[in-house]
Amino acid sequence: MSTTHASGIQVPQAPQQSHHTTRPGREGKVSWLLFSISFGVYVVLLVMMTLLKNRLSLGGLWNTEAHQFRSIDLELFNGFVDAPIWWGPWTNTFGNIALFIPFGFFLYTALRKLGHRFPFVETVLFAGLSSLIIEVLQWVFAVGYSDVDDLLCNSIGGMIGAVVAVCVPVKASKVISGIVMAGSLSVMAMMLYSSMAI
C-alpha cells in the first residue's frame, strides 16, 4: 500500500499489523515447566535412594541399619565374589544403572534445549561427576557403601538415558517425563510408607 504526495512521489506505507496476535511459545513454556517439575521430583527421589538409605527403605529391599556406617570399596565387581545373597550384586548393579537413566534423559534434554554444543558428552561426564559427589557424601556422612561399582553403573545409566533422549521425538519426551514423575512419586510414597511401617 502507498500514498501519493503533492510532488507526485509515491511513498510505501508499512502494512498494518493485526490486533489479534497470539502468544508465541506459551505451550512451550508450559511444557518446559512440567519438564522442570518432573526433573525436580526425580532429583528428590535420587537423594532419598542414595543419601537417605540409612533412614528410608523400599519394601525391605535394603536394610537401613546396614547403611549407618561408612565403607569404601575401590575394587570393581568384587561383590559378586562370595555374595551372601546370589541376587544381591545383580540387583545392585542393574539398580544403579536404572537409577541414573532418568538423570541422563532429563539432563540431555535440558542441555539440548539450552543450546549446548556437546550435550551428549556433557551429560555422560556430569552423570559421572554427580555419582562421584554422591559417593563422597555417603562416605562423609557415613551412609553405607561408597563403591566404585556405583560410579561406573551410574555413568552407564546416564549414558543410556542420553541415548533415549536422542532417539525419541519431542512428543514422546513429554510422555516419558510424565511417566518418570509419576513413577518417582510412587516410589517415594512406598519408601515413606515402608519406613513408617517398620
Image (cartoon, rainbow, N blue to C red):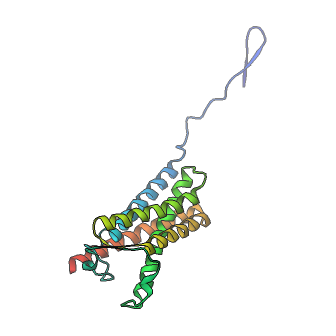
How many discs mark residues in the rendered view?
0
Which residue is located at x 67 percent, y 26 percent?
Answer: 14
Relative placement, left or right, of 148 versus 173 is left
Q: Nearer the viewer, residue 138 or 118?
A: 138
Q: Is residue 19 above or below residue 120?
A: above
Image x and y of residue 31, in percent: 49, 55
Q: Residue furthest right?
A: 8
The reply to whether residue 187 is in sight is yes
Which quadrant would residue 8 be assigned to in this image? top right
The reply to whether residue 179 is in sight is no
> Which quadrant: the C terminus?
bottom left
Q: Residue furthest top?
A: 7
Image x and y of residue 63, in percent: 28, 81
Which residue is located at x 26 percent, y 78 percent?
Answer: 64
Which quadrant would residue 10 be assigned to in this image? top right
Q: Nearer the viewer, residue 63 or 140?
A: 140
Q: Nearer the viewer, residue 159 or 68?
A: 68
Which quadrant would residue 4 be assigned to in this image? top right
> Which quadrant: the N terminus?
top right
Image x and y of residue 168, in percent: 59, 66
Image x and y of residue 89, in percent: 42, 84
Q: Nearer the viewer, residue 186 or 66?
A: 66
